Amino acid sequence: MKIIMLGAPGAGKGTQAKQIAAKYQIPHISTGDIFRANIKNGTELGKKAKTYMDQGALVPDELTCDLVMDRIQQDDCANGFVLDGFPRTIPQAEALDAALAKINQTMDYAIDVDVPDENIVKRMGGRRACLNCGATYHIVFNPTKVEGVCDACGSKTVLRDDDKPETVQKRLSVYHDQTQPLIDYYKKQNILKSVDGTQPMDKVFADIVTILGE
Ligand code: AP5
Ligand code: ZN
């Protein structure tokens, strides 16, 4: 099963993608997580990506597409994958379709996690992320057992640099300009499914399972 998660920053794509990956035994591929791991490790890619991410802008397509195309060709993707944060522009979606067409494949589902902007701004301020293992929490909706400590690995959880209010506004406007057009793109391919992302996390996941099947 090959799945794309669509939705505004903070809509809950990562939260849902992790659960999908676990249930359907497919890799979770998050471009945001890949960039953050590169920043943490001080790689050239990380240095380049950071300048864009800190401003709430998109990393250029040429730095992003090859990375994803290489990843989806690895052996563990043979039975599918869930893409989180990619594609984010029409050229990225076209690059993905072209790469799959070469091996006679197409995407199966694009799931849009729909959340209005006003809820997004509230959510982002409460998000805490573990920069060591990538786990995500929320101080109200999904708190860690011990405040500030990742349940999964014991490292510190922090407010992401790009979750500061002024950057969130910028990310939302970038989303509306560059990413929202993908909803129509996948509607035309007949693979778009929408879920109400304002519901509690387990209810959103139950709706996704209804779409994907048990
Ligand atoms: P990325 O990491 O992809 O960020 P994003 O799309 O902005 O998405 P987020 O990770 O912020 O949110 P999410 O939807 O995964 O929500 P989450 O589950 O965490 O990208 C970061 C940056 O990298 C971009 O700005 C760009 O610069 C660059 N980049 C990445 N991919 C790129 C690409 N393809 N091209 C170019 N540049 C790229 O949930 C959010 C919070 O809400 C959490 O605290 C969570 O606990 C909580 N929550 C989740 N669901 C619920 C719920 N149902 N109810 C209540 N709270 C909830
Ligand atoms: Zn952790």
Image: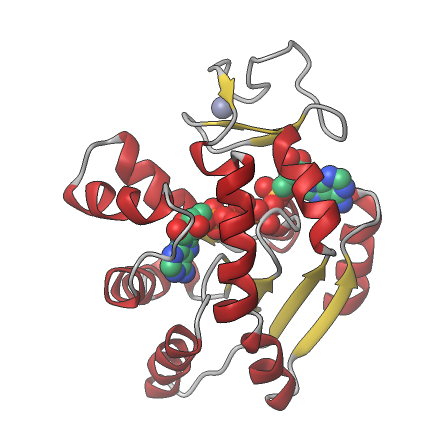
* Residue visible at 48% across and 42% down in the picture: 167
Q: How many marks?
A: 0
Furthest residue to the left? Answer: 44
- x then y, percent, for residue 62: 24, 67
Report the front residue among 46 and 122: 122
What is the basis of the colouring in this image? secondary structure
* Residue visible at 56% across and 13% down in the picture: 149
Left or right of 13: which side holds 73?
left
- x then y, percent, for residue 22: 61, 46
- x then y, percent, for residue 78: 43, 66
Furthest residue to the front? Answer: 166
* Residue visible at 32% across and 56% down in the picture: 59
Report the front residue among 161 and 210: 161
Could you tell me which quadrant the C terminus lies in? bottom right
| Quarter of image, res 151 | top right
| Quarter of image, res 208 | bottom right
Left or right of 66: which side holds 4?
right
Q: Is residue 182 above or below residue 153?
A: below
Determine if residue 185 is in view: yes
Report the front residue among 70 and 57: 57
- x then y, percent, for residue 131: 42, 27
Determine if residue 14 is in view: no
Furthest residue to the top? Answer: 146
Q: Is residue 43 above or below residue 174?
A: above
Could you tell me which quadrant the N terminus lies in? bottom right
